[in-house]
């Protein structure tokens, strides 16, 4: 059988469900998700197999109007993820309003020369009445090759979407081994899992000016792994929120992150967290490299 392999850039506005969709297509968790918009920061690739096709799914940060250096780096990563793509998959939150921010993303994608499809996500919780009208409007604006109605969370429509993506991939040898599901390094994956727990447990209590840096990732002789991380925040009040009373909140964050990492890696994980206040962490070039972003002036 002839192998096929292609790069699919998964783009959209913040909170459209791109990471959840990539996880669903891969068949396991490769990208962190949370109710907070702009959870994804760096370009990350999920690798899915469908028949003889290998799908290289680039999960990109949500595209929005940047306000600061971190924002600019995230948006640059999103558009950078489309470079060289065989297909652009534009994910639209079908339950949300098709507002100015979403229209700006659609207009930017319309200007791209790559083949494109539209994925209307969250159809399980969207009002069915406006869906066809939204699909017609997107057809007129983008002239995509196809429009899909899916729920990445429930899995509705995902198998049909995956089969269609496989049919669109060009002939070519697979770029990764069959059992590899992501291009993220172990250090980056560990930092992302801890950052996910920060978002899930603290919700609105913690603003976006926080980051997780994996300082040490050490394989031990007994087969376990020791991971040392620092959580960077801009203010002392944020540090207090993360620590909680007598360090209880940080302990819970560490426990949940450790359990998730053990599940993903299949190893016993020893996770050591500490919280550091650095009002200028966003100006640290080396940190951008560690979290998978390019420095943007």
Image (spheres, rainbow, N blue to C red):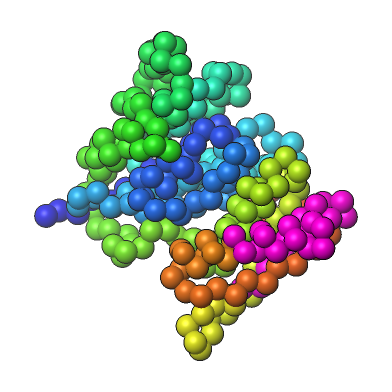
Place residue 72 in its image quadrant. Answer: top right
Q: Which residue appears at 75% of the width and 67% of the height?
A: 274
- Which residue is more in the foreground, 237 or 162? 237
Q: Viewed as shown, does residue 231 lie left or right of 10?
A: right
Q: Quadrant of the N terminus?
A: bottom left
* Residue 30 visible at all: yes
Which residues are the magenta region? 227-256
Tell me where residue 242 appears, x and y as whole percent. Answer: 76, 55
Q: Is residue 111 magenta?
A: no
Q: Which residue appears at 60% of the width and 52% of the height?
A: 196
Q: Which residue appears at 63% of the width and 71% of the height?
A: 271
Tell me where residue 235 appears, x and y as whole percent. Answer: 86, 52
Majority secondary structure in the magenta region: helix
Tell me where residue 65 appears, x and y as whole percent. Answer: 67, 31
Q: Viewed as shown, does residue 124 lie left or right of 276?
A: left
How many labels were placed on the picture?
0
* Residue 285 visible at all: no
Q: Viewed as shown, does residue 36 lie left or right of 79?
A: right
- Which residue is more in the foreground, 278 or 154? 154
Task: Say above or below: 133 vs 239.
Answer: above
Tell me where residue 21 appears, x and y as whole percent. Answer: 42, 41
Q: Is residue 245 magenta?
A: yes
Task: Say above or below: 201 vs 64.
Answer: below
Considering every residue shown, the one lying at the far right of the view is: 236
- Which residue is more in the foreground, 161 or 297? 161
Considering every residue shown, the one lying at the far left of the view is: 1
Q: Which residue appears at 69% of the width and 36% of the height?
A: 66
- Which residue is more in the foreground, 226 or 68? 226
Considering every residue shown, the one lying at the far bottom of the view is: 221
Task: Say above or below: 109 vs 240.
Answer: above
């Amino acid at each position: 059988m002839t192998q096929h392999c292609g790069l699919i850039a998964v783009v959209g506005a913040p909170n459209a469900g791109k990471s959840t969709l990539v996880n669903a297509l891969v068949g396991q968790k490769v990208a962190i998700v949370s109710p907070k918009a702009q959870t994804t920061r760096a370009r990350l690739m999920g690798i899915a197999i469908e028949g003889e096709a290998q799908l290289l799914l680039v999960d990109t940060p949500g595209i929005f109007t940047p306000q600061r250096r971190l924002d600019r780096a995230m948006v640059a990563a999103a558009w950078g993820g489309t470079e060289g793509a065989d297909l652009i998959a534009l994910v639209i939150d079908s339950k949300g309003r098709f507002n100015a921010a979403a229209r700006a993303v659609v207009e930017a994608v319309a200007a791209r020369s790559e083949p494109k499809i539209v994925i209307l996500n969250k159809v399980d919780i969207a009002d069915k009445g406006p869906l066809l009208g939204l699909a017609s409007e997107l057809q007129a604006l983008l002239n995509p090759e196809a429009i899909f109605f899916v729920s990445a969370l429930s899995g509705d429509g995902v198998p049909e979407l995956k089969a269609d993506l496989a049919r669109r991939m060009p002939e070519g040898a697979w770029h990764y081994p069959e059992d590899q599901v992501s291009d993220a390094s172990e250090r980056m994956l560990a930092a992302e899992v801890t950052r996910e727990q920060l978002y899930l447990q603290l919700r609105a209590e913690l603003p976006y000016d926080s980051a997780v840096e994996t300082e040490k990732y050490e394989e031990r002789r007994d087969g376990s792994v020791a991971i040392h991380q620092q959580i960077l925040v801009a203010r002392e009040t944020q540090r207090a929120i993360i620590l909680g009373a007598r360090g209880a909140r940080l302990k819970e964050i560490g426990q949940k992150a450790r359990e998730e990492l053990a599940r993903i890696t299949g190893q016993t994980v020893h996770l050591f967290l500490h919280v550091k206040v650095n009002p200028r962490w966003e100006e640290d070039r080396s940190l951008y490299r560690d979290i998978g972003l390019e420095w943007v002036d």
